[in-house]
Image: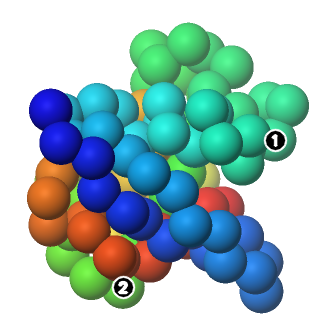
Amino acid sequence: MSKIRIMFQIGNGFIEAQARCGSRLANTIKKEGLGSSEFSKCNYKLECGKCIVSSSENILGCPSKDEEILLTLKGMTNNYRCSCQVIVTPDMQDKIIILH
């Protein structure tokens, strides 16, 4: 699988990272040490909502019904996703993804 460059926004700062297409976005965030100590504490089971990301561009795909329910309970809807459920695609090349 090929690698792409993604820009992560954390607060007012930006960090560039390499991500492998076909992998979970959360894997890249974890590998780069960008998440908090609570990041994906459910081990990608979609139970904690600690790995939420967003983008102003439509590059994160559509959430499943279960993910949609979790995001709604957290007050986050349009363009928000749990990074443990997002698969890295070539469309994300050079795009900004915001960590929440």
Type of amino acid under label 1: Ser
Residue found at x 58% / y 43%: 29
Viewer-proximal residue, 85 or 28? 28
- Residue 51 in picture, x, y percent from top left: 58, 42
- Residue 6 in picture, x, y percent from top left: 42, 65
Q: Which image quadrant is residue 32 in? A: top right
Mark 1 crowd level (few <14, some 14–19, many ≥20, 10 Å Cα) = few
Considering only vertical position in the picture, is 8 above or below 35? below
Q: Furthest residue to the front? A: 2
Mark 2 crowd level (few <14, some 14–19, many ≥20, 10 Å Cα) = few
Considering only vertical position in the picture, is 8 above or below 41? below
Question: Would residue 24 be seen by someone viewing this image from the given angle?
Answer: yes
Dot 1 or dot 2, earlier in sequence: 1
Secondary structure, mark 2, is loop
Quarter of the figure that contains the C terminus: bottom right
Residue found at x 72% / y 70%: 10
CB-based contact (under 8 Å), mark 1 and mark 2? no
Q: Is residue 11 left or right of residue 46?
A: right
Q: Which image quadrant is residue 37 in? A: top right
The residue beneath circle 1 is 36
Q: Furthest residue to the right? A: 37
Viewer-proximal residue, 15 or 10? 15
Q: Is residue 33 left or right of residue 61?
A: right
What scheme was used to colour the molecule? rainbow
Marks 1 and 2, how far apart at CA: 22 Å
Considering only vertical position in the picture, is 66 above or below 42? below
Q: Is residue 2 left or right of residue 43?
A: left
Question: Would residue 50 be seen by someone viewing this image from the given angle?
Answer: no
Q: Which mark is residue 58?
A: none
Type of amino acid under label 2: Ser
Q: Which mark is residue 56?
A: 2
